[in-house]
Image: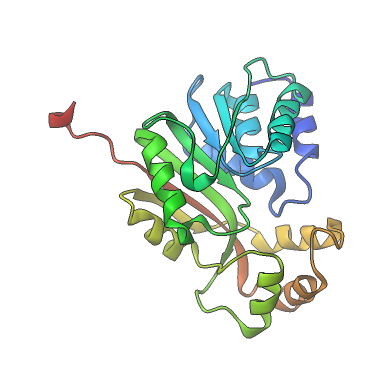
Amino acid sequence: MVEKSAIDKFTSTLDPVPGNIHIVIELLKRLDLKTASSTLDISGPPFPGAIGAMIEYKCHAHVTVFSDDEMSQAKKCCSEFSIRNPLSAQIGLPSSIPWEESTFDSVISIAAPVPLSLTPGIISEIYRVLKPGGYFAWAGPASYTNDIPTYMKLPLRSMQFGEIKTPALTALIISHTGFHILNAEIFKSSWEHWEHWLEVSDNEKMTDEFRKSLIRDHGSWLALGIIIVKKPPKPEWAL
């Protein structure tokens, strides 16, 4: 572990993501990351999974970015937390990840604006770059049921959240690529984290329509989910 000040500094950068540091640390803990393992974060700045893995587990972290500006942000994030290992960044769309096959021990996506399960091209690329036995971990907006309430449909579009589903259904769709499902659950105290986001977010990060619908919902439908799937290891006869 590194000194507490580094963790505190990291935590302070994550507001106002729903779930904040709690969901990041919980996700990393579930992955049981090993020292010096290689992880890819496709979340976008501030790359909470990558930075958290580097601080807590001394992982070799990499990120996929969409622009030169995000590339600069990735390198800045690394230097701000006094991380000795360099943060590797490459520009590329998540549906065409610019890394070789079987490169990473884990791939992480936290607070993705659109559920990745609805984008098969991204999932197949994640599967491709993972080593056999590697993990894909996702955390972000989820729901208690798969039927979207009428009062949430337009507000969700205004936030570009896409069609939010239950963790169970999302994991099932992801598994069609070949993944084995390990976890698919609602994150504890989901409403408390959304409520905190209501308090700290300004109008640039949350539309009025979404704010009103979130207050009306009050945790009855909208939640936060955690999904962990595993790429099957190679069978003994293929080793």
Residue farthest top in this picture: 84
User: Which residue is the extreme one toward the bottom?
Assistant: 150
7 horizontally vs 96: left or right: right
User: Relative to the observer, which residue lies in front, 93 or 6?
Assistant: 93
Q: Nearer the viewer, residue 237 or 103?
A: 103
Q: Nearer the viewer, residue 197 or 154?
A: 154
Question: On screen, 13 above or below 207?
Answer: above
Quarter of the image containing the N terminus? top right
> Residue 114, image x and y in percent?
58, 59
The residue sitting at 47% across, 43% down in the picture is 96
The percent position of residue 178, horizontal first and vertical second, equals 30, 49
Quarter of the picture containing the C terminus is top left
Tell me which corner region of the image, top left, top right, bottom left or bottom right, holds residue 160: bottom right
Which color scheme did the rendering employ for the protein? rainbow
How many marks do you count on the picture? Answer: 0
Give the image quarter of residue 45: top right
Instruction: Tell me what residue is drawn at x 43 percent, y 43 percent.
Output: 126
**For residue 38, side relative to residue 188 (left or right):** left
Q: Residue furthest left?
A: 237
Tell whether 148 sits left or right of 118. Answer: right
Residue located at (65% from left, 25% from top): 55
Q: Residue at horizontal 69%, vertical 43%?
A: 21
When the figure is inspected, residue 202 is found, relative to residue 69, above or below; the finding is below
Q: Position of residue 186 (x, y in %)?
A: 54, 60
- Residue 79, position as x, y percentages in the image: 75, 22
